[in-house]
Amino acid sequence: MDDLQFYPTPAHLGAKICSMFECPPSRVLEPSAGNGDLIKAMRRRFRDVQCDMYEIDPARHDTLRDQGTILGYDFLESTDLSMYSHIIMNPPFRNGVQHVLHAWRRMFSGEIVAVLNASGVQRPTTADEQKLCQIISDHGRVEYVQEAFLSPDTLRKTTVEVALVYLRKTKTEEFWNGSILEGLSEDETSFEDYRGAAVSNGIALNGGQVKALVRAFNIAWEATKQSHIAEERSVMYSHFFYAEFRRIVNKAVEPAWLAPKKAESLQERLAESYAKLKEAAWMSVLNTSDFRAYLTRKVIQEVLANFESIKKLDFTASNIYGFLQGFALKKADLNLQMVCDLFDSIAWRNSENCLFYRWKSNERHQVGMALRRRRFILSGFSTEGWRSDLGWEAERRLEEIDRVFALVDGKQEPENGLLWLFRNHFKELVGKKRMTSRYFDVRYHSGIGTIHFFPLDQKLLDRVNLLVGKHRRWMPEDYDMTDREKDLDVAYKGAEAFSDTVSGKLNRWTLRTSLDSDRTDSERNSALDDLDAAFDAAVQATGQDGNFFTGIRKLESHKENEPSDSQRSLALVS
């Protein structure tokens, strides 16, 4: 706490600070939010004002989210504050002057109130303190308060005398007369595909690509801001000439082009444009090839569901790297979810793709599933007679199958995958020719829109089944398939006939609902009950226990009782 010099603003001081503002706010920024005490004071005085915040201590972010929008950690890294009408702050005393100067430079027009250590304002010694005192003299006022942090409602007390600094920045003559292109540099951003070498954390953008995105964003925002400023100038001058026109012709009707397009202030229009541009910029991060390579459509949908909080962050290199680092830390979870998503999409389409088993016979809702090793079938790949390829949606499905199998295989992406096969050999596939990609032989039935997939490496499919089975507690956590290929072959064959019986007792709704996490708990539990009933009926009909691992353990027991090769050799010798 001492390192961050955190002194919460007591309620009485917050109320006094807010009372110093002369105009009602449209959008407020708090550069060092702490516990949100100043934001609460602003809301008490101005009701539903929109508030944004920075807070350098990440431990406070969870409690701050209810108070407003968190833009980032370090306020001094912000590049533009033109969308704010008011800035209110109680910054750390050690660099409070720098906070106020930064706010003054980056703010377009509006009011600032800051709580500072009084000594730096009363007896300025540094260049920054002297600069601030000159700004106060030209554009504001200061009020000194003793014992501001000694009242009963103060959480952390100090005897330091504080200065309440008020500044008001207005549109100057330079604003009305400036050039729209002044200060803009030519856009030299290159949008090449910066792939670079693979990085260790798995989800990252090349540094050059991040810098290119941030540079493009800053240039786009500066141009957008200047367009709003130009429009403001245009309205002012146009109204001046039209006022002269009305005096001459004595008409009060204004032409439509002079009518205000929006009732919002300039800051509100800037804020709206800035938010839209930031949303598009963050979406561009999600849309890069390096990033999307690690996400299935379902994961992307979940990211987009949380996009409201992402798109409000400052679009800076440090925030982008922090965002990507967060995904890197979740890489194992994302990878597992990708495998589960693919598993569900295959099982969901057709119960004939599944093997059904239990490893604990007495637990409710513990019917496990595995994908069949020899073949699985997927539908939804039909084409119109005039088409010479699959549609976009169908191609993405093939791409995700290869992506997950490459992941399980320890590869970044497959060579000669399914998408490559269908794009380069579509005519042969339509002719029902069985063809080979990196991980599958496939046969395409274009008339009914199904593809039959024959895995070339059954160990990869076993790995998929193992990952999903352990994650969903369908199989023992300590189960390891290493050196058990022959045992697995026998167990799979034994499970197929039993699973055919289970499939015959299931309807499509039951299987799909049991795998659909978007269903209500009641719907899923009902479907799982039906799945349990179908499994129990198959056990009764076949006389088998339906335990996939029983067969493996029997094989292991049988092996233990068999004489070894050396024992056989000794017997022959004797």
Image (tube, rainbow, N blue to C red):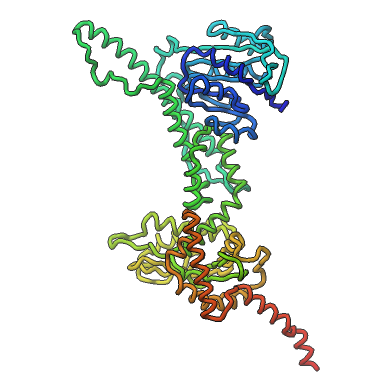
Measured from the top left, where is residue 66 in percent x and y?
55, 33
* For residue 480, above or below residue 304: below
Q: For the point 66% across and 68% down, which residue is it? A: 482
In depth, the one of 376 and 184 nearer the eye is: 376
The residue located at (66%, 13%) in the rendering is 162
Q: Residue at x 49, y 20 (%)?
A: 46
Given residues 83 and 60, the one toward you in this image is: 60
Quarter of the picture holding the C terminus: bottom right
Along the line of sight, the residue nearer the viewer: 57 or 389: 57
In which quadrant of the rendered view does residue 172 lie? top left
Outermost residue, left direction?
A: 249
Q: How many marks?
A: 0
Residue 419 image offset from top left, x and y in percent: 44, 59
Q: Left or right: where does residue 220 sit relative to residue 146?
A: left
Q: Position of residue 131 (x, y in %)?
A: 60, 10
Query: Splitting the image into 4 quarters, where does residue 101 fall?
Result: top right
Quadrant where the image shows the N terminus: top right
Q: Is residue 25 above or below residue 429?
A: above
Residue 401 showing in the rendered view: no
276 in relation to 364, above or below? above
**In the image, 88: left or right of 349?**
right
**Residue 432 visible in the displayed image:** yes
Could you tell me residue 127's position as x and y percent?
Answer: 65, 11
* Extreme residue toward the right, this view: 574
Question: Residue most toward the bottom?
Answer: 574
